[in-house]
Image: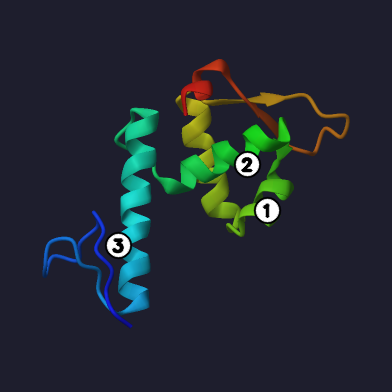
Amino acid sequence: MEPQATGVTDGRKRGRLSPCVCSTLRMVSRAVTHCTTISCGRADSGSRSFSILATMARSGEANLRQLEAGLAIDQTTLTRSLNLLERDRMIERVPHPDGRVKAMRLTRKADGC
């Protein structure tokens, strides 16, 4: 496979991607993470937070189980990320008919992401 010229580099030769698909995927992933961090204007907003916010934006409102299944994130990691988003006022808890369900929605502050 011949490397293609792009703006993403692997540090060896400017404008060339590695022929290793795994290495290229990791470089692109880091570039996307960097772009999402910049778009949200927060140094600690990573791709996981962006994925959570994007999923919630599509559904309007979500609960812990829906996010866990839809994002393939374990409950502990998801809860920690949700707590940070709630702390930063990007999401807020909303009442749910079943009091045991933790439902959330985006706040106006999250609209910029």
Q: Are there few (<14), some (14-19), or many (20+) residues within 10 Å of tag 3?
A: some
Q: Quadrant of residue 64?
A: top right
Q: Is residue 90 left or right of residue 63?
A: left
Q: Are there few (<14), some (14-19), or many (20+) residues within 10 Å of tag 2?
A: some
The quadrant the N terminus occupies is bottom left
Instruction: Report the residue at 31% width, 51% height from top.
Output: 31
Q: CA distance from mark 3 to mark 2?
A: 23 Å
Instruction: Report the residue at 43% width, 47% height from top.
Output: 47
**What is the tally of numbered marks visible in this picture?**
3
Of residues 5 and 48, which is closer to you in this image?
A: 5
Residue 23 in sight here: yes
Q: Is residue 13 left or right of residue 27?
A: left
Q: Quadrant of residue 52?
A: top right
Of residues 110 and 44, which is closer to you in this image?
A: 110
Q: CA distance from mark 1 to mark 3?
A: 24 Å
Foreground: disc 1 or disc 3 = 3
| Residue at numbered disc 1 | 70
Pointer 3 and pointer 2: residues touching (CB < 8 Å)? Answer: no
Q: Which amino acid, by three-letter code, is at mark 1?
A: Gly
Of residues 22 and 110, which is closer to you in this image?
A: 22
Q: Which mark is residue 25?
A: none
Residue 45 in sight here: no
Residue furthest to the bottom in view is 1
| Residue at numbered disc 3 | 27
Residue 41 lies, with reference to residue 73, above or below; the image says above
Q: Which amino acid, by three-letter code, is at mark 2?
A: Thr
The numbered mark, 2 or 1, whose residue comes first in the sequence reads: 2
Q: Position of residue 11 (x, y in %)?
A: 13, 65
Q: Which mark is residue 55?
A: 2
Q: CA distance from mark 2 to mark 1?
A: 8 Å
Of residues 105 and 101, which is closer to you in this image?
A: 105
Tag 3 secondary structure: helix
